[in-house]
Image: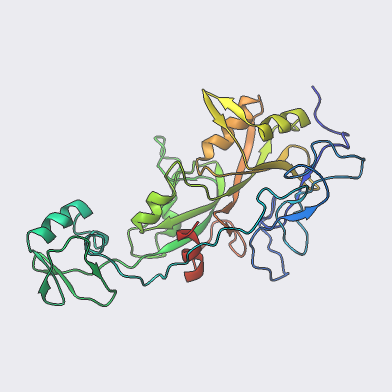
Amino acid sequence: MNNGKGNKSNKKFSSSKPKFGSDKRSKSGDSGQPKFKKETGNSSFGDNKPKDTNASVKFNKDGANNKFGAYKGKPRFEGKPKQKIVKSLNEDIRLNKYISNSGACSRRDADIYIQSGNVSVNGIVITEMGYKVKPNDIVNFDGSLVIPEKKEYILLNKPKGFSTIGDADRQTSNVMDLVRMATKGKIQPVGRMDKSTTGLLLFTNDSDMLRKFTLPQQRSPKVYQVSLDKNLKYEDLEKVKNGLHIDDHRIQVEEIEYVENQPKSEIGIKLTTSNVKVVRNIFEHLEYNVLKVDRVMFAGLTKKNIPRGNWRFLTDQEVINLKNA
């Protein structure tokens, strides 16, 4: 079997943001946001076969500019990018959602209480559906003061041995053990992650955020570094890049390349699904054993300044970016 060694036409996947194969952070002081660099060529991320032995597309993990995926060819999207509407974190919200956020009941049940005249805002009974309350309004629900839980957003760099669901053998700890002391809020992990997968995992008590990132049409990028038991053949890399059919489902990735200055068994892959099983299925379908999967970017968030097993709160701007992702 051709293990891919010595094939000078093979491309390398280069990026230092996110950093593949290392948790050490760059001292360059950049913002950590992946960028694409345009050079000459015809394809979105570089010609499939470089014109000379020195041409390559590198996934650089050590560059000072911390760029993700410097590539040759036309950019994937041309023209003026669509401008996103940035929402304030302190915007008015619907009364039923305000009540639901407090944990009193669901939004549907809150509607029933509102229509029945059991909800008041600043001492005035409200029966109007869709009524919006301000952050400083005083809301009484069925005779009790409603105090919505503060929204918390925590980013963890998950180590091995922790799962989003406890294993039956009880040898695997739950990821909640790693963030239990971070807040008293009822946070939950966004999506699932098995005990052997490492890297970024978001936690929040924001029900809208939890729902947002579990929808099939959610298109925010996630980047993984995958370690295989043998070198990934160039023809298999091209198969993944062009799309695979697995169990009657077409799997399309945004980008896949070799990690620079690493064996051809180290692969960088970018896709929109948050289901880690898809990453493993891609390579297992091509008869490779997956030794390690590390999520190094999640919807624009990176592991910068978060050592393995540590966590941090998101900034207000990061939360806004996630809501608009």
Q: Residue 126: which quarter of the image?
A: bottom left
Q: Residue at x 12, y 64 (%)?
A: 127
Residue 43 position in % (x across, y down): 76, 42
Residue 125 at x, y percent in the picture: 10, 70
Where is residue 6 drawn, in percent x and y?
Answer: 88, 34
Q: Nearer the viewer, residue 212 or 186?
A: 212
Above/below status of 210 relative to 237: below
Q: Residue at x 77, y 58 (%)?
A: 62
Q: Is residue 271 above or below residue 106?
A: above
Q: As displayed, is residue 306 above or below residue 273?
A: below
Q: Quadrant of residue 242?
A: top right
Q: How is the image coloured?
A: rainbow
Q: Is residue 318 left or right of residue 307?
A: left
Total marks drawn?
Answer: 0
Note whether residue 110 is visible: yes
| Quadrant into which the N terminus falls | top right
Asked whether, in this view, residue 37 is left or right of residue 163, the answer is: right
Q: Residue at x 26, y 60 (%)?
A: 97
Tell me if 71 is positioned left or right of 323 in this view: right
Residue 106 can be seen in this image: no
Q: Position of residue 214 (x, y in %)?
A: 42, 45
